[in-house]
Amino acid sequence: MPKFEVQTSIDAQANYCKNNHLPHFAPYDGLCWNCNQNIYLPGKRFWRGNFDGRESEGISVDKASNELVTGCPHCFRSYCD
Ligand SMILES: [Zn+2]
């Protein structure tokens, strides 16, 4: 089971970017400015602005620690363009 903890993931992503000399794209409070959901928690999946009836997973602590976050896992909005 993936673990979801907002503050832990925020810190993990910030550290990941710093340690790998990568730009930090994710919102610093974890809130997606496009769909208003927290990217570090499970949520609702939006496709082209509409809720498509499915759940979206969100970014787990493990992912936030090991992968660069470049977009929202719920609405697929990119943070790096
Ligand atoms: Zn979003």
Image (tube, helix red, strand yellow):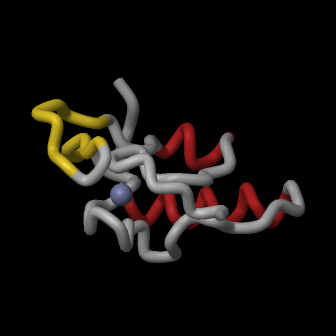
Q: Quadrant of the C terminus?
A: bottom right
In terms of image quarters, where does ligand 1 lie?
Answer: bottom left
Q: Residue furthest left?
A: 53
Q: Where residue 3 sits in the image (x, y, percent)?
A: 38, 38
Answer above or below: position of 77 versus 3: below
Q: Nearer the viewer, residue 1 or 21?
A: 21
> Which residue appears at 65% of the width and 62% of the height?
80
Which residue is at a point 39% across and 53% down the rendered structure image?
Answer: 40
In this rendered view, identify the residue nearer to me: 40 or 72: 72
Relative to 35, is 51 above or below? Answer: above
Percent position of residue 47, x then y: 29, 42
- Position of residue 28 in the picture relative to residue 4 (left or right): right
Q: Residue reaching furthest front?
A: 48
Q: Quadrant of the N terminus?
A: top left
Image point (38%, 60%), residue name: 6
- In percent of width and height, residue 5 lies at 37, 53
- Front-most of residues 48 and 57: 48
Residue at image position (25%, 53%) is: 49
Total residue callouts: 0
Q: Whole-percent x and y of residue 45?
A: 25, 41
Which residue ends up furthest to the top in the rendered image? 1
